[in-house]
Image (cartoon, rainbow, N blue to C red):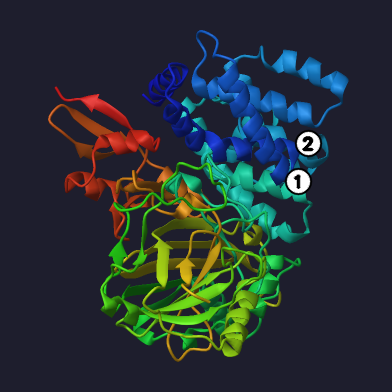
Amino acid sequence: MKKELDIELYKKYLEGDKEAFETLYYKYKNRLQYFIFNIVKDYQRAEDIVQEVFIYVMQHEIKEGYSFKYYLYLVAKSKALNCINTEKRRSEINEKYLSKESDMVEQDVSDIVMKKENKKTLIEAINTLDDKYKNAIYLTKIEEMSYKETADILGESINNVKTLVHRGKRNLRKILLKKGFGEMNKVLRVIIIVICTTLVLSGLVYAVSVIYKNLNKNHNITFNASYESTLDDNTINNLWIGTLDLAWKELEEKLERKIELDENIEIADELNASTFTKDMLSADDYTIEVNRTQTNGYDINATLNKNLNFLYSFDNFSNDYNYTFGKDTNSTEYIKYFGINNASKEELNNNVEVLFFNEISNNAVNNDFAVKLKTKEGDEIILYRTDENKSFDEYYNDIISKSKEFTGSTILEEDDELLIPYVRVNGRIAYNELFGRTIKNTDGMYISNVVQNVNFSLNESGANINSHSTMTTEYISVGSRYFWFKDKFIIFMKEANSQRPYFALKVDNSDILEKKEENDEPKIIDNIVIAPERYQKYLIGGEYKFYEDENYEYFYPSHRTEVVEVYFKDGGFMTVEEALKEGKISMDLLDKYGVEYTKKAKR
């Protein structure tokens, strides 16, 4: 079904439909990036090669009989191998791999990253497994035999072989971690992660600067693990929110010590240095839930919810003006804005306090100002217009110092204007740099999962924020002033009497701003793609029927209904199964997001 949809979209692109190819791009981009990274071992280069792959596929029509996915991985493998070979060798590899059959493209990624010098260590670990698992894993993963070939040798059914490999992988992972996960070389860690998961990952969410973009291609965001870490020109639409800090500090309280890892990790250092605490929030706005895991580790969930309303709703300018965002004067991407102009009701001025407005000589457009937006709940929303690249902490300190120095009017006057874009953020990230790291002085406790998400919106009525962070550990043992936020700006949210914000967002392009032509269609997330190591239990078992209509029954390949979720613009979410049954979405949305399922005609 998905193959047919891919080809249909590709044909539409060939007929001139650019959006059709864009759908394919966002469907496969992260998956290709993971595949390529395991060959070139360089995140930045992997990103570059992904672009090269899609350009090649756009310019060279798929050969007859090839599926889109097969052709895409074929080109990706060729270009990745070209990257790590000499110019002479590149042409030979290109010719060789573009003529291979599909089994060379669809093979397990672990076969690519595994090198001869790592096989000895891995085989030693395999040898400690029970015999029923040992041969199944050795034949499929070391000798690279198919499940059918392995089944014939072992005298088992193909399904039994798959079960043995799956269970063996889980046991193998435990053995390798006990042998000293933190001491193993970087390549071997990649092998462990890939081999021991129950499926080849369809996307890699790594470090702090890459976010799972299939949530909404028009609202991409990058996360900062620390409020204090410096931002630069290479990171756009940066967001920090304190939920991960809350979970991290809660674990520190349980351990009664700072969290020191077996290796220096920048993210961990920044979280340890963070000064944000739960005392900076009202008790009604956050929750921290702590449970013990089966190995007596900790599963910590921190949430933050805020629903803020301005004293008065601002005017919506979306139908009145065609404004863009940024310095591109030729852009035709019109953004939705709200605010105040000379036709607005005077009472709207009560929403705003001017913090500072600094004139810049020889510049017709002011680029250094900040305002505070007041809410009925007492929280303050601070908008800061700047072109500088600093940390959120430095930005906020600049606001404080500039506000103290400002001697002008702090109220909006008759000829002043305020222009603010609608903002919508849907973001989720797994901090994989922390995955598998042992915590010192804990008798073998290691971090098995760190995930953070956030839904944020800013419009003429107010702001809404919903964020959740999970951290799991296990044991193995002058004149008119125009306050136009039409270019790079910062958003802070804090409680009125707090010394620190609980939310910070840097906006420097239009990806997360609402477009006039944009609809409010829900977005689907398959959590297994984002954090497969956490959701392995949902990948086993037989087919699961999650929906039916008059003509068909629809099945997931396993009981994964709890982890395939649909998110709505208002911040609400539910499982896809619930949304279908309540009529809030249709099966077309699953196809759009490439959710894996099968359908069977009713008799």
Q: Which residue is mark 2?
A: 115
Would you place residue 451 above or below residue 602 in this image? Answer: below
- The number of numbered badges drawn on the structure is 2
- Left or right, 360 with respect to 569, comes to right
Q: Quadrant of the N terminus?
A: top left
Secondary element type, mark 1: helix
In the picture, the disc for residue 187 is: 1
Of residues 512 and 452, the one drawn nearer to the viewer in this rendering: 512
Q: Quadrant of residue 10?
A: top left
Q: Earlier in the sequence, mark 1 or mark 2?
A: 2
At 70% from the left edge and 75% from the top edge, which residue is drawn?
Answer: 260
Q: Is residue 246 visible?
A: yes
Of residues 233 and 90, the one drawn nearer to the viewer in this rendering: 233
Of residues 387 and 24, the one drawn nearer to the viewer in this rendering: 387
- Left or right, 480 with respect to 561, comes to right
Q: Quadrant of the C terminus?
A: top left
At 61% from the left edge and 32% from the top edge, which residue is drawn?
Answer: 108
Picture coordinates of residue 449 (x, y %)?
Answer: 55, 61
- Left or right, 439 with respect to 408, comes to right
- The type of residue carrying mark 2 is Lys
Would you place residue 59 above or below residue 356 in this image? Answer: above
Picture coordinates of residue 548 (x, y %)?
Answer: 18, 35
Q: CA distance from mark 1 to mark 2?
A: 9 Å
**Mark 1 crowd level (few <14, some 14–19, many ≥20, 10 Å Cα):** some
Secondary element type, mark 2: loop
In the picture, the disc for residue 114 is: none
